[in-house]
């Protein structure tokens, strides 16, 4: 999923003109990708003259931090060490499930080529 680095985007509009599904809009001087509309063609990434359209992988650390912030927020609802440990185990099972879904999806994606 491409995303636009606000610090790097100058709002030149090149990507808006080239997106085949009009998934990019302008908010003041920054382009924004509508995730629901984007078909992951990668054109915006290839044509941005400033490399402001970035790859998914760069967001991994940020997404991990977001998960940990979410987990910390949930932990605030529990007072005892035992309750907190139980919650952490539940969260681990949740992310294990997410991992399995991702791994199985990756395995099966090639079958869609036919
Ligand atoms: S082409 Fe790049 S710099 Fe221009 S609006 Fe799009 S993301 Fe921003
Ligand atoms: S990846 Fe393709 S569809 Fe998605 S915003 Fe960029 S140009 Fe548009």
Image (cartoon, rainbow, N blue to C red):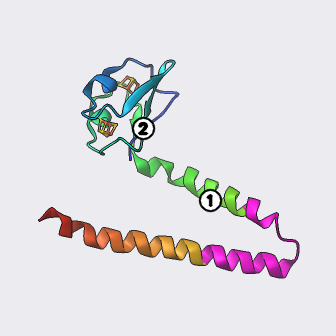
Give the side of residue 68 with respect to residue 61, left or right: right
For marks 2 and 1 on the same chain, the one whose residue lies earlier in the sequence: 2
Q: In the rendered image, which quarter is residue 113 located in? A: bottom left
Please say if 31 is above or below 53: above
Tell me residue 92's x, y (percent).
Answer: 61, 75
Residue under the point 26% across and 36% down: 43
Please say if 35 is above or below 5: below
Q: In the rendered image, which quarter is residue 22 located in? A: top left
Give the side of residue 109 with respect to residue 4, left or right: left
Give the side of residue 77 with respect to residue 89, left or right: right
Residue under the point 65% across and 78% down: 90
On residue 67, the disc is 1
On residue 86, the disc is none
Tell me residue 36's x, y (percent).
Answer: 40, 44
Please say if 83 is above or below 21: below
* Mark closer to the observer (2, 1): 2
On residue 34, the disc is 2
Q: Is mark 1 within 8 Å of ligand 2?
A: no
Q: Is residue 75 magenta?
A: yes
- Nearer to us in this view, 37 or 10: 37
Q: Residue furthest left?
A: 114
C-alpha span from label 2 to label 1 = 22 Å
Q: Is residue 91 magenta?
A: yes
Q: Which range is magenta? A: 72-92
Mark 2 lies on a secondary structure that is loop
Q: Is mark 2 within 8 Å of ligand 2?
A: yes
Q: Residues within 10 Å of mark 1 (few under 14, many from 20)?
A: some
- In the picture, the quarter occupied by the C terminus is bottom left
Type of secondary structure dominating the magenta stretch: helix
Residue under the point 66% across and 60% down: 68
Q: In the rendered image, which quarter is residue 86 located in? A: bottom right
């Amino acid at each position: 999923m491409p995303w636009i680095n606000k610090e790097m985007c100058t709002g030149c509009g090149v990507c808006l003109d080239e997106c085949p599904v009009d998934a990019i809009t302008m908010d003041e001087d920054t382009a924004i990708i509508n995730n629901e509309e984007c078909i992951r063609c990668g054109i915006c990434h290839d044509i941005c003259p400033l490399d402001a359209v970035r790859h998914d992988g760069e967001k991994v650390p940020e997404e991990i931090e977001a998960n940990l912030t979410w987990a910390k927020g949930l932990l605030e609802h529990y007072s005892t060490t035992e309750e907190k440990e139980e919650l952490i185990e539940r969260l681990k099972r949740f992310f294990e499930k997410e991992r399995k879904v991702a791994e199985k999806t990756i395995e099966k994606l090639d079958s869609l080529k036919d």
